[in-house]
């Protein structure tokens, strides 16, 4: 069975979690977490590197010990270290880690103090009021645990967009090798660039459906075949991801693609328009009576009901049909529109590469400028910069810009917004920078009013340029902090500063609805990679997808500007 980077990273993450629950050496724990991060951010399958005989210990965070485990997992599908740890702890203990707000340290306390190792025991203890008495918990945390348990019970397993994309890419390549296949497309929420994906819907154009389906269910990663027919099959992969494949004719491909892309609400709205015109729309085409009048392409389907083509990312029935009728659909931003990246890290804080290496990687990604924005001193876990180290870095950036490297570096910092709204470095130091990114990295539990005041005060600092990952969420790991985002966006307009759309697949923050609100308020959004290594620039594509879901056009995005115009906008925030 093929082993993907995500599979190995999941093993390393589980080892780190179990070691932390056991109270093991923090440096050993961090090594596994860094290794998992490297694998997830790697643009190529590590399996391919090994097959080519490349030395994987050259990868950031992969030493001889982790490399040996990678070889073991690729060869056997198992890791003896993980197997041993699983035997030492309850089998379902790691399920607690999937609840927002419960990291390994808290699970360690729950396990060792209250002997809790599954959801049922956790819920019972919370309802009995036992958890709030543990050090570091309290009544509010206990209440949030009950809310998280309820939310977990209400949702099925979903995969982050980037993770689903890795499985989709391999599967699409495999399906294209089937005899007679002329086209393969992933539809559903994946095509709409939803931040998480419940399953994959794949459409195939082929002459012989049966042979394609037989080819599909023979895929090495198939765990169970849930159903199989002449033109359709549903399987469950070893990863737990469900995949539906449908074989369609070229004549109905556009109709099928529209139908299975969704969303359901969007499709219902389009069908109602068709019904008012005496038409019927389904996955086979657009029909007037028994005659198919359209269906070969999606554009043809939309045209048949009097609509222009609506991009997949907009199809959520959130005003796109009304905008299409009125001729007001946005011309959505595209990857090629980005001229630079305004959020990146080097090994001066928690990044993995030097300034020179990051700049070269940005140039190879087609970027003209890159802001170096390492963390400030408050974030000690990231080895944040104090004033002295920041000033030294500025000299390095100026020396780099004195040469001809095909990319310009901007002087910046990701400065912590402290609890009272002040910034983590002196104003006279921040005034020397091209860009000051403010970020909340602590006290996520403040009340809505306090969190909002905190951020508003930070934005009022005359050196403030851009609010990083504005909601603070980590998808499936940490809920957004409670903040009045509409007020934040309006204040950004009044203050004349900007908001970030952090493109990291675990963030995708701004939310798509907040992107739309920022656009309506005239607040520019910067689509940034938050790159910590050279492969992280690939994440910009996920930011583009989120921006498109938020109706953003090229002119709504700060870093689509050429450098000369960007400098004027940045200076205008001071």
Image (tube, rainbow, N blue to C red):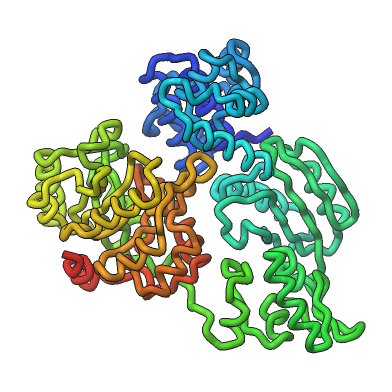
**408 up-or-down from 474: above or below:** below
**Which residue is more in the foreground, 270 or 229?**
270
Locate residue 181 relative to residue 355 in the image: left or right.
right
Q: Quadrant of the C terminus?
A: bottom left
Residue 424 lies, in percent from the top left, at 19, 43
**330 up-or-down from 353: above or below:** below
User: Can residue 404 be spotted in the picture?
Assistant: no
Residue 192 lies, in percent from the top left, at 60, 62
Query: What is the residue that sits farthest to the right in this orientation?
Result: 290
Locate residue 91 relative to residue 9 in the image: left or right.
right
**Which residue is more in the foreground, 51 or 533?**
533
Residue 20 lies, in percent from the top left, at 46, 20
Locate residue 409 relative to residue 67 in the image: left or right.
left
Residue 500 lies, in percent from the top left, at 36, 58
Q: Quadrant of the N terminus?
A: top right
Q: Going 34% across and 61% down the picture, which residue do you hit? A: 499
**Which residue is more in the foreground, 571 or 458?**
458
Q: Going 26% across and 53% down the picture, which residue do you hit? A: 437
**164 up-or-down from 192: above or below:** above
Q: Going 44% across and 52% down the picture, which residue do you hit? A: 539
**469 up-or-down from 418: above or below:** below
Splitting the image into 4 quarters, where does residue 463 fall? bottom left
Q: Going 33% across and 49% down the picture, which residue do you hit? A: 450
How many labels were placed on the picture? 0
Locate residue 126 relative to residue 448 in the image: left or right.
right
User: Can residue 414 be spotted in the picture?
Assistant: yes
């Amino acid at each position: 069975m093929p082993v993907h980077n995500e599979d190995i990273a999941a093993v390393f993450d589980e080892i780190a979690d179990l070691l932390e629950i056991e109270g093991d050496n923090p440096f050993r724990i961090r090594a596994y977490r860094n290794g998992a991060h490297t694998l997830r951010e790697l643009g190529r399958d590590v399996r391919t590197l090994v097959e080519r005989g490349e030395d994987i210990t050259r990868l950031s965070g992969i030493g001889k010990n982790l490399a040996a485990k990678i070889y073991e997992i690729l060869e056997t599908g198992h890791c003896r270290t993980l197997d041993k740890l699983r035997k030492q702890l309850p089998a379902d203990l790691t399920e607690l880690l999937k609840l927002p707000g419960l990291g390994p340290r808290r699970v360690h306390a729950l396990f060792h103090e209250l002997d809790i190792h599954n959801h049922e025991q956790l819920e019972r203890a919370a309802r009995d009021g036992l958890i709030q008495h543990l050090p570091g918990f309290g009544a509010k945390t206990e209440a949030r645990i009950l809310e998280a348990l309820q939310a977990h019970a209400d949702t099925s397993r979903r995969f982050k967009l980037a993770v689903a994309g890795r499985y989709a890419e391999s599967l699409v390549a495999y399906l294209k090798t089937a005899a007679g296949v002329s086209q393969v497309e992933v539809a559903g929420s994946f095509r709409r660039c939803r931040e998480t994906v419940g399953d994959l819907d794949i459409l195939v154009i082929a002459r012989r459906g049966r042979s394609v389906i037989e080819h599909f269910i023979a895929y090495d990663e198939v765990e169970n075949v849930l159903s199989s027919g002449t033109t359709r099959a549903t399987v469950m992969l070893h990863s737990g991801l469900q995949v539906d494949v449908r074989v369609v004719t070229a004549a109905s491909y556009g109709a099928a693609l529209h139908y299975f892309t969704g969303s359901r609400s969007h499709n219902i709205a389009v069908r109602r328009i068709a019904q008012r015109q005496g038409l019927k729309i389904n996955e086979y085409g657009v029909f007037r009576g028994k005659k198919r009048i359209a269906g070969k392409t999606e554009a043809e389907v939309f045209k048949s009901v009097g609509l222009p083509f609506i991009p997949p990312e907009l199809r959520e029935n959130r005003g796109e049909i009304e905008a299409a009728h009125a001729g007001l659909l946005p011309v959505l931003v595209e990857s090629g529109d980005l001229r630079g990246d305004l959020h990146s890290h080097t090994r001066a804080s928690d990044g993995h590469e030097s300034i020179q290496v990051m700049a070269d990687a940005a140039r190879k990604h087609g970027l003209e400028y890159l802001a170096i924005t390492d963390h400030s001193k408050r974030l000690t876990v990231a080895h944040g910069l104090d004033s002295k180290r920041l000033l030294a870095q500025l000299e390095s950036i100026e020396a780099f810009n004195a040469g001809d490297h095909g990319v310009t570096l901007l002087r910046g910092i990701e400065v912590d917004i402290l609890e009272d709204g002040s910034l983590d470095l002196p104003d006279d130091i921040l005034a020397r920078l091209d860009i000051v990114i403010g970020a909340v990295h602590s006290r996520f539990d403040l009340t809505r009013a306090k969190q909002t005041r905190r951020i508003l005060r930070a934005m009022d600092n005359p050196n403030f340029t851009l609010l990083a990952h504005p909601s603070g969420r980590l998808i499936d790991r940490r809920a957004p902090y409670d903040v009045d985002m509409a007020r934040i966006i309006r204040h950004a307009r009044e203050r004349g500063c900007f908001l970030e759309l952090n493109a990291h697949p675990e963030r995708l923050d701004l939310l798509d609805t907040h992107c739309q609100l920022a656009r309506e308020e005239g607040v520019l959004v910067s689509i940034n990679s938050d790159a910590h290594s050279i492969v992280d620039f690939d994440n910009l594509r996920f930011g583009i997808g989120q921006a498109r879901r938020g109706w953003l056009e090229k002119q709504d995005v700060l870093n689509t500007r050429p450098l000369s115009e960007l400098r004027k906008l940045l200076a205008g925030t001071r």
